[in-house]
Image (spheres, grey):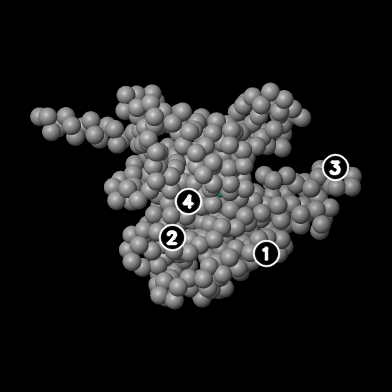
């Protein structure tokens, strides 16, 4: 009888634990393998009073549409926590949305960028405690991505994961539960959107916003085009200031995003070169796994395969890999033990 009671209390407590992917573009919360929150990492702030007006999807809708005194900021965009205070408030808002106040305060695993400083780590922990966490574990994003993509990271064999997000691309080689090589570059999905904006301005004297550029990338962008697609877009003529329609093609968009794409390829190659021979030969065998929203750019796997001669795979639902990984860690006692954690002071 007592045994049964204990078990149901434990599972109730475990059932409240959550994993969080604090991404540069999107924040996701995952509980028991299920994504329960997925919103842009955006905060709308009133400039003069610093008052927060909206967070997440609501705030993203304001990008490019805000009146002068309101700004929509993406506090994580550069892969580092650019603005602690705003990040803390944003995270607090998302966590509160997912956990109701209760006697059983949850444990949290939060994926953070690999290069995060101790001050940045602290800001994440504080936000989690303020939102009601009992204990916070921090995990490096590429490790969470690898776990979420199904890589057996604990095994004594090397695997490479390339997580292409909004602000950063994180490349990591995992073996025996750790990252044995890797690098992080500030070139990812956003850089491609910017490159598209620049191209349209140069080639057609047409101005489009970030959201249109992203839409073009998603609809007809291609990292290794085999066929041509076209898309009608609307922009504003730089000279006349009037709205115009224009048809753009895959081949020119490919040309436009070729620079950021080759920077990603270069970073992968350099990381492979820096990897010890034994581990490198494991990767030749196991291949490269792509995660993050950038893994959804058409044929990016083909491009990397062509450039490295390695097998390349896109993870299943790559936008969810990090979030799934953070939640999976909660179910693995040993992995959890390997992470640095802090407990709330007012327990
Ligand atoms: P982060 O982890 O930095 O928050 P995400 O992994 O959520 O980033 O990926 C966001 C990036 O993925 C954005 O640049 C977005 O434009 C891009 N993206 C999302 N879906 C697609 C798609 N279908 N095709 C190409 N790019 C995509
Ligand atoms: Mg990410």
In the picture of the structure, the residue carrying the numbered disc 1 is 258
For marks 2 and 3, the one nearer the N-term is 2
User: How many angstroms separate mark 4 from mark 2 (CA)?
Assistant: 11 Å
For marks 1 and 2, the one nearer the N-term is 2
The image quadrant where one finds the C terminus is top left
Rendered residue at 56%/70% (across/down): 269
User: How many angstroms separate mark 1 from mark 3 (CA)?
Assistant: 29 Å
For marks 4 and 1, the one nearer the N-term is 4
User: How many angstroms separate mark 1 from mark 2 (CA)?
Assistant: 29 Å
For marks 4 and 2, the one nearer the N-term is 4
Q: Nearer the viewer, mark 1 or mark 2?
A: 2
Disc 4 C-beta below 8 A from ligand 2: yes
* Residue furthest left as drawn: 1
Badge 3 crowding class, 10 Å Cα cut-off, few under 14, some 14 to 19, many 20 or more, is few
Rendered residue at 10%/29% (across/down): 1
- Say whether marks 2 and 3 touch (CB < 8 Å): no
In the picture of the structure, the residue carrying the numbered disc 2 is 179
* Element at label 1: helix
> In this image, 106 relative to 164: left or right?
left
Rendered residue at 33%/44% (across/down): 330
């Amino acid at each position: 009888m007592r045994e049964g009671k204990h078990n149901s209390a434990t599972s109730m407590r475990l059932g409240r634990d959550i994993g969080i992917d604090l991404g540069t573009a999107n924040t996701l919360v995952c509980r028991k393998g299920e994504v329960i929150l997925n919103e842009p990492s955006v905060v709308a702030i009133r400039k003069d009073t610093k008052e927060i007006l909206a967070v997440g999807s609501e705030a993203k809708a304001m990008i490019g549409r805000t009146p002068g005194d309101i700004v929509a900021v993406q506090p994580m965009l550069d892969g580092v926590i650019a603005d602690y205070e705003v990040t803390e408030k944003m995270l607090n808002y998302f966590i509160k949305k997912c956990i109701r106040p209760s006697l059983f305060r949850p444990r949290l695993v939060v994926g953070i960028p690999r290069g995060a400083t101790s001050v940045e780590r602290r800001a994440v922990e504080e936000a989690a405690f303020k939102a009601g966490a009992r204990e916070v574990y921090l995990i490096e994003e590429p490790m969470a991505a690898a776990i979420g993509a199904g890589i057996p990271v604990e095994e004594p064999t090397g695997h490479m994961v390339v997580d292409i997000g909004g602000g950063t691309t994180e490349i990591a080689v995992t073996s025996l539960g750790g990252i044995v090589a890797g690098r992080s570059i500030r070139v990812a999905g956003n850089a491609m959107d910017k490159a598209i904006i620049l191209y349209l301005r140069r080639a057609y004297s047409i101005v489009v916003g970030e959201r249109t550029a992203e839409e073009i990338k998603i609809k007809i962008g291609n990292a290794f085009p085999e066929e041509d697609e076209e898309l009608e877009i609307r922009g504003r003529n730089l000279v006349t200031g009037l709205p115009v329609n224009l048809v753009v093609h895959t081949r020119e968009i490919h040309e436009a995003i070729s620079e950021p794409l080759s920077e990603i390829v270069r970073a992968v190659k350099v990381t492979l070169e820096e990897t010890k021979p034994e581990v490198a030969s494991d990767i030749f065998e196991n291949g490269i796994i792509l995660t993050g929203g950038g893994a959804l750019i058409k044929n990016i796997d083909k491009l990397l395969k062509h450039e490295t001669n390695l097998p390349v795979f896109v993870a299943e639902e790559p936008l969810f890999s990090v979030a799934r990984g953070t939640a999976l860690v909660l179910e693995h006692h040993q992995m959890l033990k390997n992470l640095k954690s802090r407990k709330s002071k007012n327990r």
